[in-house]
Amino acid sequence: MLKKFTLKNYKNFKDEISINFENTAGYQFSTDCITDGIISKMLLYGRNATGKTNLGKALMDINTTMFGGQPYHETGLFLNADSVDEAAFFSYEFRFGNNELVYRYARLSNQKLRNEELLIDGKTIFSCDFEKNKFDFENLAYIDAETASIDRYLQSVDIGGAEEFQNLKLPFLRWLVSNVALSNDSILIKLGNYVIRMLIITAGKGMLRISGGMNDSFYKFLENSDRLKDLEDFLNEMGIECKLVLTILPDGQRELYFDHEKLVPFYETASSGTLALVDLYRRLIPKSWTPSFIYLDEFDAFYHYEMAEKVVDFFKRRYPKCQIIMTSHNTNLMTNRLMRPDCLFILSRAGTLTALCNATERELREGHNLEKMYISGEFERYE
């Protein structure tokens, strides 16, 4: 699991900001927010333009670094506009069983890596400084990767040619997991399995009627009556009383309907909240694997407050071991009945992140009304 994430000089985060998932306060209520001593369910609050979305994109950067693909921050400024530093700093600390793994690197842009370093149980396994062409691979034997063809890797990063390609360096960690036969219990395999299952979902994106192969794929998934019933049960559990039917039209196209005396086209008539729920379901449930980490950005933007609570409860039950960060403006969710003060965080305009239990001189207990305290300004200096 992810123990700690640290970020610096990225977009609106000029100074260092960290999320320490091990910093729990020992509360004996809402214990389903904690897994193996690590925060697994977190609610993140912050005024508009504090960087909640940017924080999610930064957390997902390790996915692009390890496996390639389209960066999650392909648009807009990458580095902080007020900083003189030339690179953004990312650090991820993981716990896998009895082992501790730290992977950290600096980026000049969303495409250009300046350096990277991997540590396991406090030992530096490798370090790469692409600007100075300094590389240290002395401890690869510690992870049974001593057979790695280092010369072949160094040839791949010595691109030469046009200047615009000089900084497009292949991360050594990506090359290592792709080119070395690692044992099934290798800590790098565990890291890869975690990172590849990290997701970020932003409310509203993809909410409207989808088309093409993605739509067909979802409908094909729903052709199984048990799966269609699962979607129907999910919507009813969220307070949307309905019955669904999937039909195949004369032209061979599939279509989803509300089942009434007359079939009612689902996507043309469903409310924004219902569409948001189905989009959330579509992005998560059909997957053949269980997510390891989910960043749900303003997940409840289209929900009634009671539905938002039901969604949180659903995620806690459905994904008990998955680390989930949910951003919200809904103060109704700021309750010990659902969460707890060490799992509720405020992101400030200054780029600081503070748990509610550390944002007041009071000793917060189960009986405190956290929403009332928040609205009355109890935590205002941390906003």
Image (cartoon, grey):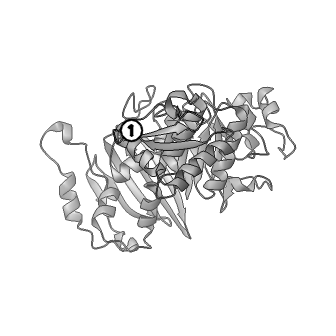
Residue 104 horizontal side relative to residue 321, left or right: left
Residue 278 horizontal side relative to residue 332, left or right: left
Q: Nearer the viewer, residue 116 or 144?
A: 144
Q: Is residue 82 visible?
A: yes
Which image quarter: residue 321? Answer: bottom right
Residue depicted at x 79% and y 30%: 378
Residue depicted at x 21% and y 58%: 154
Instruction: List the residue tagged with mark 1.
Output: 87
Residue 195 horizontal side relative to residue 277, left or right: left
Q: Nearer the viewer, residue 116 or 4?
A: 4
Residue depicted at x 41% and y 65%: 188
* Image quadrant in which the C terminus is located: top right
Instruction: Give the answer, above or below, for where 331 lies relative to 99.
Output: above
Q: Nearer the viewer, residue 283 or 134?
A: 283
Please, what is the three-letter code of the amino acid marked with disc 1?
A: Ala
Q: Nearer the viewer, residue 281 or 247?
A: 247
The picture places residue 351, in percent across and down from the top left corner, at 58, 33
Q: Residues within 10 Å of mark 1 (few under 14, many from 20)?
A: many
The picture places residue 349, in percent across and down from the top left corner, at 60, 27
Q: Secondary structure at mark 1?
A: loop
The picture places residue 263, in percent across and down from the top left corner, at 53, 34
The picture places residue 270, in percent across and down from the top left corner, at 56, 30
